[in-house]
Amino acid sequence: MPKKTGNDLKLETLASWITKSKSTCAMTGAGASVESGIPDFRGKGGLWSRYDPEEYATIFSFQDDPAKVWKMLAELIETVEGAKPNPGHIALAELESMGMLSGIITQNVDSLHQKAGSKKVIEFHGHCRSLKCDECNKRYTDTHLYKKQFPPKCSCGGVLRPEVIMFDEQIHGSVLLESKELSSSSELMLVIGTSAQVMPAALNPYLTKASGGKIVEINTEETPLTCDADMTIIGKSGEIMPKLLSIIKNRVEL
Ligand code: NAD
Ligand code: ZN
């Protein structure tokens, strides 16, 4: 028998926590989609190494120069539409269908949890599936309108934007409320692939903790959350999550 590594032992403990927990949720960040080919903020050669988020991802930069920001948005839409869920997304969807996960709060705008089959997904920072006019609130399902008119415009003349929350923009009230409810009603939160620095998303794990729940972090490196987490597993989400799922499946079948 091969010797068990530190992570194997942690995964055994985590599997017990999940099977005993009355309610477990997950919060995911850009790291959960890195293995699907969507870079996180530090990924080399990716979108964000060419477009500084400070310059391209704030609502003020969009309002000042929409055509400049749309160069980045067009690339983001193409990247997201071409991406496929990785084994980490699939394991989370399976945990939900087994009744072991009550929902996911995601900071990602890539719809990969839904593509993997997850049903309850709270999109904290919105999504790229449609465009919206901030002048008249009209929505457009054709995300490729920018190929006909650049930047794409609404029939009222306003500039369209994907339904993502940009930096310095408010999170929708309904989304804040839903994530607050899920976080504070969970006995356990899996925090996967987030640098735990973007506010207010980074507060969600603390709502679980404040209600007496546990936080388990899965990340390729330590983050500011690590010192408050009940367990940190260092590794890739696409490798750790399927391992966790298979341990849980073995236990459920016993
Ligand atoms: P971040 O880029 O700040 O941090 C990503 C974290 O994931 C890092 O801590 C990194 O160590 C970790 N990581 C990298 N690869 C991993 C892997 N394979 N498995 C597990 N962990 C891994 O991301 P954030 O905390 O989500 O904040 C960035 C913001 O930008 C978010 O608000 C998000 O909306 C947005 N964003 C979204 C996408 C997307 O939709 N896929 C991509 C980039 C940025
Ligand atoms: Zn309009």
Image (tube, grey):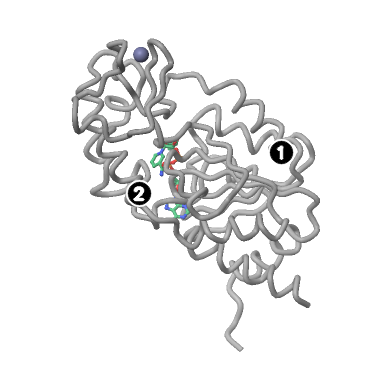
- The amino acid marked with disc number 2 is Ile
Residue beneath disc 2: 38
Name the image quarter holding residue 180: top right
Q: CA distance from mark 1 to mark 2?
A: 28 Å
The correct choice, above or below, for 166 with respect to 228 in the image is: above
Using the image as rendered, state which of residue 242 and residue 146 is in the foreground.
146
User: Ligand 1 near label 1 (Cβ, under 8 Å)?
Assistant: no
Percent coordinates x, y for residue 100 in the rendering = 71, 56
Using the image as rendered, state which of residue 240 and residue 118 is in the foreground.
118
- The amino acid marked with disc number 1 is Thr
In the image, what residue occupies the spot 64% across and 51% down?
A: 216
Q: Furthest residue to the bottom?
A: 1
Frontmost of labels 1 and 2 is: 2
Percent coordinates x, y for residue 236 in the rendering = 47, 60
Residue beneath disc 1: 208
| Mark 2 crowd level (few <14, some 14–19, many ≥20, 10 Å Cα) | many
Quarter the C terminus occupies: bottom right
| Mark 1 crowd level (few <14, some 14–19, many ≥20, 10 Å Cα) | many
Q: Is residue 154 left or right of residue 195?
A: left
